[in-house]
Image (cartoon, rainbow, N blue to C red):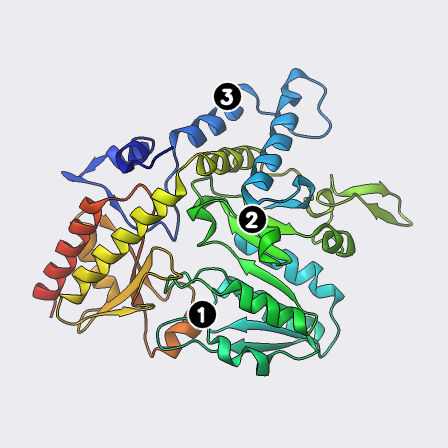
């Protein structure tokens, strides 16, 4: 198995489009990735030949039930965990909220949750809601000047009252990857659980979650070459068994009477109602697609593009990169500003070059406050991006620097 960017690009129909006379240079993968043929075909097959509900159908269409079960196994294999520890959710945000509600219900007033300054709002607001509801406390790890969590401060922030450390595996702004080993060792020393928000890490290859030593992991389908409307929560079986349901309804029950209701075993107790069957089938196909890719070659290719991009930005007067200066322990997300030009104006100029990026605070306002910024322009890459995408991007930034200030 060897990596060929041309072969990968050929699997994504959208990348062959010509829009307004220009090819598509899609560099907004941190918001949503594109979808390969194999995923599109899997969802299309379900919607056109096998559409049915799961669990109780009696027609031949209950093959959908078997497919949904197989997709849970495919996702589990991608993460290196047992299938019955996989909970399908509506997305990454929904998965974090599930943990905040269900695991959070086991916490007591005065218990503490430790976050960091670079978290996405989806890993801040649910804990603030829990604080208002249950009287927990929230602590925050600051970030360093190069956009990494300041692990030197971790020992003083952890206490016996810390019950959970919840961090981005990879920052959606700086691309920095957290030192999971250091975090887990410190957290376990006080008996705290660890959750990682894998939204920006999962799209870059299979994982071995047990080897990481963590307790919860979440990611979203639409950022990992899959459909919208589906996400994943992984949690250790003992934790799932101890947690009450997040939502009530059909499918998540054992027995219902007006006197009491018993719950189905995990993961079903956390999947009330009709699950996102088609999206889950698509996510399973996406996980299989990712497992078939040569990630040693793909990651080397991604890092070469990051270097190409950063080298080019450093030659543009007034361009400032926020995040790690090197390639170690980082993923292909790069945020920058252009002195005298609003990030949205940079993004609009790039759009005229056929380049799609993201501008704004990236749902990370505390991190923007840390760097005294209103926002940045963000580039986020995937294995299907190539040098032509980076060249078009740099041409657009040079044009913005020349014409907009």
Residue under numbered circle 1? 118
Pointer 3 residue: 48
Residue visible at 91% across and 50% down?
A: 259
Quarter of the picture containing the C terminus is bottom left
Residue 11 at x, y = what percent? 34, 31
25 relative to 155 in the view: left or right = left
Q: Residue at x 18, y 73 (%)?
A: 339
Disc sitting over residue 33 in the figure: none
Q: Nearer the viewer, mark 2 or mark 3?
A: 2
Q: Indicate the secondary structure of the residue bearing disc 2.
A: loop
86 shown above or below 213: above
In whole angstroms, how far apart are the C-alphas of marks 1 and 2? 24 Å
What residue would you read off at disc 2? 208
Q: Is residue 205 above or below residue 285?
A: below
Foreground pick, 48 / 118 = 118
Gap in Å between the C-alphas at discs 3 and 1? 42 Å
Quarter location, residue 266? top right
- The answer to whether residue 96 is left or right of residue 363 is right
Give how far across and how far down residue 350 sits, in percent. 19, 54
Image location (x, y in percent) of residue 395: 12, 54
Crowd rating for badge 2 (residues with CA inside 10 Å; few <14, some 14–19, many 20+): few
* Circles 1 and 2 in contact, beta carbons < 8 Å: no
Residue 163 in sight here: no
């Amino acid at each position: 198995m060897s990596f060929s960017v041309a072969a990968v690009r050929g699997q994504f129909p959208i990348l062959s489009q010509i829009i307004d006379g220009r090819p598509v240079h899609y560099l907004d993968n941190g918001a949503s990735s594109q979808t390969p043929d194999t995923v599109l075909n899997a969802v299309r097959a379900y919607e056109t030949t096998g559409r049915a509900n799961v669990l109780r159908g009696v027609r031949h269409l209950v093959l959908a039930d078997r497919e949904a079960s197989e997709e849970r196994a495919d996702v589990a294999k991608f993460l290196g965990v047992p299938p019955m520890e996989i909970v399908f959710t509506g997305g990454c945000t929904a998965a974090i909220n599930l943990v905040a509600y269900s695991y959070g219900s086991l916490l007591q007033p005065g218990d503490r949750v430790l976050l960091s300054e670079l978290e996405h709002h989806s890993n801040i607001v649910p804990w603030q809601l829990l604080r208002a509801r249950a009287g927990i406390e929230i602590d925050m790890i600051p970030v360093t000047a190069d956009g990494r969590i300041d692990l030197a401060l971790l020992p003083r922030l952890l206490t016996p009252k810390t019950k959970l450390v919840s961090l981005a595996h990879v920052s959606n702004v700086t691309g920095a990857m957290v030192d999971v080993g250091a975090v887990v060792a410190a957290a376990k020393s006080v008996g705290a659980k660890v959750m990682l928000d894998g939204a920006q890490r999962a799209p870059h290859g299979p994982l071995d979650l047990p080897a990481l030593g963590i307790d919860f992991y979440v990611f979203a389908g639409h950022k990992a070459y899959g459909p919208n409307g589906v996400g994943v929560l992984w949690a250790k079986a003992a934790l799932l068994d101890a947690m009450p349901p997040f939502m009530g309804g059909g499918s998540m029950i054992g027995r219902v009477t007006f006197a009491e209701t018993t719950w189905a075993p995990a993961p079903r107790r956390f999947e009330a109602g009709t699950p996102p069957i088609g999206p889950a089938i698509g996510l399973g196909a996406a996980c299989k697609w990712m497992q078939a890719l040569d990630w040693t070659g793909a990651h080397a290719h991604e890092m070469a593009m990051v270097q190409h991009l950063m080298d080019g930005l450093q030659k543009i007067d007034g361009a400032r990169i926020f995040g790690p200066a090197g390639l170690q322990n980082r993923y292909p997300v790069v945020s920058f500003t252009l002195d005298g030009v609003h990030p949205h104006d940079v993004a609009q100029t790039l759009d005229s070059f056929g380049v799609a990026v993201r501008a704004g605070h990236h749902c990370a306002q505390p991190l923007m406050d840390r760097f005294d910024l209103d926002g940045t322009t963000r580039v986020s890459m995937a294995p299907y991006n190539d040098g032509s995408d980076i060249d078009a991007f740099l041409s657009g930034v040079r044009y913005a620097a020349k014409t907009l200030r």
